Image (spheres, grey):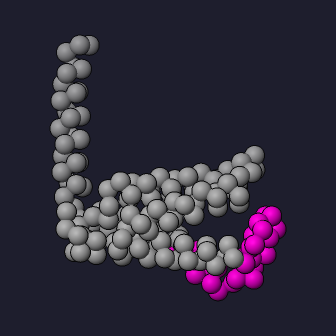
Amino acid sequence: MKTWVPLLGRILRAAIRQQEVAYRDNPAVPLLGRILLAAIFVQSGVGKVLHPAMTQGYMEKAGMPLAGMFLVLAILAELGGSLSVLLGLLTRWGATVLIIFMIPTTLIFHGHVGEQMQMIMFMKNVSMTGGLLILLANGAGKWSIDERLFPS
């Protein structure tokens, strides 16, 4: 049994190194990640712009005070933050705005984790926040406006 363990370890290390090289140096990977991460925020922000009364009613039903003001702030956060992430322009700031937006949104609107759909929405938001934290830590990548303005 002990003879195959070192062999397996060498195979795994080689596979991991190969994968790291393939993705680390591929500028399309972070770009695709930004596009996919921003898409839900763009869609949600546009939905709020197109249907403000419905969104404000939903916010009021959830017990939010000053729902009209928070609706405007939500639109600004979602559209501003998502466009920042999508374009790779001041990406860390955009990710920070979206993270700050996600915390109360997740707790207020999806905090009823005893309901299966709310638990799914809660975990979706937690996962999206994780993606935003990765952007915050690593930046937008080579194919971004940030890289053109502030080369690493």
Relative to 4, 36 lies left or right: right
Say above or below: 39 vs 100.
below
The residue positioned farthest toward the bottom in the image shown = 50
Say above or below: 142 vs 121.
below
Q: Residue 126: x, y in percent?
A: 55, 52
The residue positioned farthest toward the top in the image shown = 2
In the rendered image, residue 43 lying in the magenta stretch gets the answer yes
Q: Overall secondary structure of the magenta stretch?
A: helix
Q: Residue 10: x, y in percent?
A: 18, 30
User: Is any atom of residue 126 visible in this view?
Assistant: yes
Q: Quadrant for the N terminus, please.
A: top left
Number of numbered labels in the structure image: 0
Q: Residue 145: x, y in percent?
A: 28, 75
Say above or below: 113 vs 70.
above
Residue 122 or 4: which is nearer the viewer?
A: 122
Residue name at image x 22 percent, y 48 percent: 20
Residue name at image x 53 percent, y 70 percent: 40
Residue 123 or 74: which is nearer the viewer?
A: 74
Say above or below: 150 vs 126.
below
User: Is any atom of residue 58 visible in this view?
Assistant: no
Residue 104: image quadrant is bottom right
Residue 32 or 6: which is nearer the viewer?
A: 32
Q: Residue 118: x, y in percent?
A: 70, 54
Q: What stretch is highlighted in magenta?
A: 42-68
Relative to 95, 9 lies left or right: left
Residue name at image x 35 percent, y 54 percent: 137
